[in-house]
Amino acid sequence: MERGGNLNNWAEDKGIMSVGKTMMERLGEGGDGEWNLSLDRWDWSQGVGLYGVSRMWEASGNKACLDFVRSWFHSHVQHREFGSVNYVALANTALLLLKEEADGASPEAGLYRQVCTEYADWCLNRALLTSNGGFAHVWGKGGLEDYKNQLWIDTVFMAGIFMIDCGLILNRNDLVEAGIRQFDIHVDCLYDREEQLFVHGYHCIREEQLGEHWGRGNGWMAAGLAELCRLLAGTAYEGESDRFRQILVRLMNRASSLRGEDGLLRTLLNCPEAYPETTATALFGYAALMGARTGILDASFSQWGKETLHAVMGQIGPDGRVMCASGGTDCQEQAGYLRVPYIQSLYAYGIVLMLLSEGLRLFKPL
């Protein structure tokens, strides 16, 4: 497939690129009055949004996606922040641009490598750790004091993926091994073996699980485990992925059994009263399609992924709005999860773009 072109040249494969084009245009509008979060911040929501754009670039080869990420990065890199695992999500932009830099000695490549190294070193040496060595879920300048004692499921996606991917690119075994260790800690603490699902959080001092079987959180884990296995394939660490693949298969099978008649998962996966939720559904669909495509999962998961793709595309309005996507969610009692409203958000757009990127690979030879 030829690389290059702009948004208007995208092919209409099953309508996926048409939808992706509309969503990209809306993403680029930034903070209008209806937008939950502006692109003019360095935080996890922007990181997920741009991760989705990055995955669209890798799947489509359309230069407009790469240019979008590059333009954002150079406009915001001077405002990068440290102090929270959530901020690490945006380091994936620097890592993508480093991979795409033809001349590794250029000033731009040096900047990308510098930013990647800064976040790698923060993860290894400066991140606040809980008593069991996991990343504490602190929000930089915000968050509750008690969060210093908590693990949250989001972390494996926000920081774990970057650590492993960056470690492999920069030949940093210490970073790869630390990333695998974070996955191990979070899986061990958050997995509910009876339900074969994950809970939202874990309190390391009280040694107790927190929250419920939150849909998007389980989606973060499904996508994170699939990414981990994909990245480790063919490396010296491939054998490390076996235990994670086993957990991923159990999680995927359990989640598949909890889908509604509309193909959507709920904001609490195993709660019949919970409302349907698009981002949880899209993350599982992404894991299903990517896992089946790369051999991480059995080929049979591809059918679930296709059904999920169809269901999620039905939740995208003609103006590119993602519908039925829940707002930011803390660890809480069941009733609290059910009160979280639907909102427009950068992370919802990024998650859906991730799924669309795998949908493209179903129909376009690369």
Image (cartoon, helix red, strand yellow):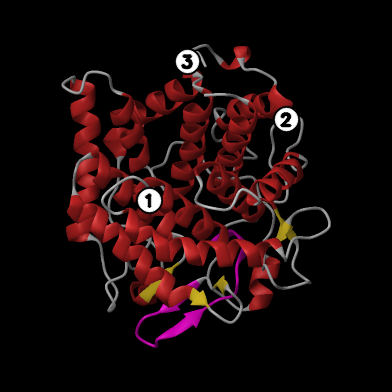
- Compared across the picture, whether 27 is left or right of 237 comes to right
Q: Marks 2 and 3, Cα distance to the nearest angstrom?
A: 27 Å
Quarter assignment of residue 90: top left
Give the amino acid type for the residue marked by disc 2 in the picture: Asp
Instruction: Give percent across and percent down for residue 92.
Output: 36, 40
**Residue drawn at x 63%, y 38% as measured from the top left:** 33
Name the secondary structure under disc 1. Answer: helix
> Which dot, 2 or 1, sits closer to the camera?
1
Q: Determine which residue is flagged by label 2.
A: 319
Q: Hey, which residue is sitting farthest bottom in the picture? A: 206
Q: In the rendered structure, which disc, 2 or 1, sits on the residue that comes first in sequence?
A: 1
- Compared across the picture, whether 204 is left or right of 303 comes to left
Q: Determine which residue is flagged by label 1.
A: 161
Instruction: Give percent across and percent down for residue 152.
Output: 44, 68
Give the amino acid type for the residue marked by disc 1 in the picture: Ile
Q: How many marks?
A: 3
Q: Residues within 10 Å of mark 2 (few under 14, many from 20)?
A: few
Is residue 27 a member of the stretch shown in magenta?
no
Kindly tell me whether residue 144 is visible in this rendering: no
Instruction: Give percent across and percent down for residue 236.
Output: 26, 51
Q: Determine which residue is flagged by label 3.
A: 3
Name the secondary structure under disc 3. Answer: loop
**Residue drawn at x 48%, y 47% as measured from the top left:** 45
Name the secondary structure under disc 2. Answer: loop
**Residue drawn at x 50%, y 51% as measured from the top left:** 296
Residue range (magenta) = 201-217
Is residue 207 a member of the stretch shown in magenta?
yes
Q: Nearer the viewer, residue 50 or 313?
A: 313
Give the amino acid type for the residue marked by disc 3 in the picture: Arg
